[in-house]
Image (tube, helix red, strand yellow):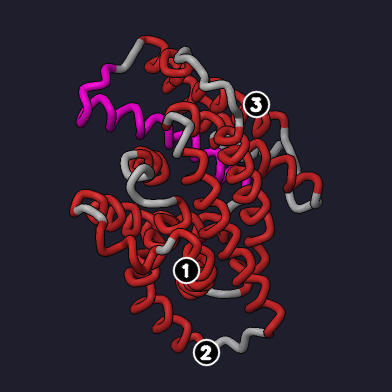
Amino acid sequence: MLVGAAIVASRSVVAEVPPLTLAMLRYLVGVACLAPFGWAAWRVHRTQVPMRDLVAMAALGIGQFGLLIALLNWGLATVPAAQAALIFSLFPLLTMLLGAWSGREEISGRLLAGVLLSIGGVALAQAPKLAAAHSGHWWGELAVLASALVGAACTVMYRPYLQRYPTLPVSTYAMSASVFVLAVLALGESWPQRVTGFSAGAWAVVAFIGVASAVGYFWWLYALKHESPTRVTVFLALNPVTAAVLGDVFLGESLHAASLAGIGLIFAGLWLATRPKIIAA
């Protein structure tokens, strides 16, 4: 749900805040929220972490928190939020396929049906907005799809480290690594000079998505620690639902009948994908 809210919020400032700068500021705020608790938890556990694990977790953080959001922000510069949400909803399907390919997850018929049903619900919910004319180029859509693929790969590869180490310090460390890299990459957008000219509204949006990232990604990694990647990522189908509800409440964008039917399919898909296995007597 926080992803859906952040997509709408990010869409509102991409014209003022460049993609890499927005990603860097977003996670700088997120690290500021997590650091007081994350580093304290790390000292309490006093876990001896091998260098190879530190490097791997940093790389996953750069991918999950840096590259993914940079690609998504780049796509949102040209792709409407509804279309971006629909493309990004392929995240759980890509996760399931990568998990099965890597041998880390078994695909059941019920899980596959639930994922496909939720994607169908997203498509139906966004159908009225997707009827708008297309500009003729597809770089934005490809960027959003690439962000979903990066997220799926990182999600599958995170699990061993989340099972080995506490969630809070892992999320803080991974997010900190992404901020450092993004700060260097965003120099091409002249962020040290540009940030002083951002409007108060832009800073309010950055603060919101930063706090949302801190809260959302901590619980995201916590869920990955205890559940299979596909069962976790299937809930990303709620992000267009959140966007639609927020648009209705705050922007007066009324919900169409197709949107309401799509929301029903999404919840049916979530129910089907997350049902516990029935063990025969």
x and y, in percent, of residue 71 in the image: 55, 47
The residue singled out by tag 1 in the image is 183
Q: Amino acid at mark 1?
A: Ala
Classify 256 as above or below 219: above
The residue singled out by tag 2 in the image is 46
x and y, in percent, of residue 242 in the image: 35, 34
Classify 189 as above or below 136: below
The residue singled out by tag 3 in the image is 113
Q: Can residue 186 be seen?
A: yes
Classify 222 as above or below 260: below
Quarter of the image for residue 138 reads: top right
Labels 2 and 1 touching (C-beta < 8 A): no
Badge nearest the viewer, 2 or 1: 1
Q: Amino acid at mark 3?
A: Ala
Magenta stretch: helix, strand or loop mostly: helix
Residue sitting at 71 percent across and 79 percent down? 52
Q: Amino acid at mark 2?
A: Arg
Q: Nearer the viewer, residue 267 or 74?
A: 74
Residue sitting at 68 percent across and 52 percent down? 153
Secondary-structure class at tag 1: helix
User: Could you classify mark 3 by the number of other residues whose Cα lies within 10 Å: few (under 14), some (14-19), or many (20 or more)?
Assistant: some
Q: Can residue 174 be seen?
A: no
Of callouts 2 and 1, the N-terminal one = 2
User: For the magenta stretch, what is the residue range?
Assistant: 229-254
- Whether residue 237 sits left or right of residue 28 in the image: it is right
In three-dimensional space, the C-alpha distance between marks 3 and 2, rounded to whole angstroms, equals 43 Å
Quadrant that contains the N terminus: top left
- Whether residue 270 sits left or right of residue 29 in the image: it is right
Of callouts 3 and 2, the N-terminal one = 2
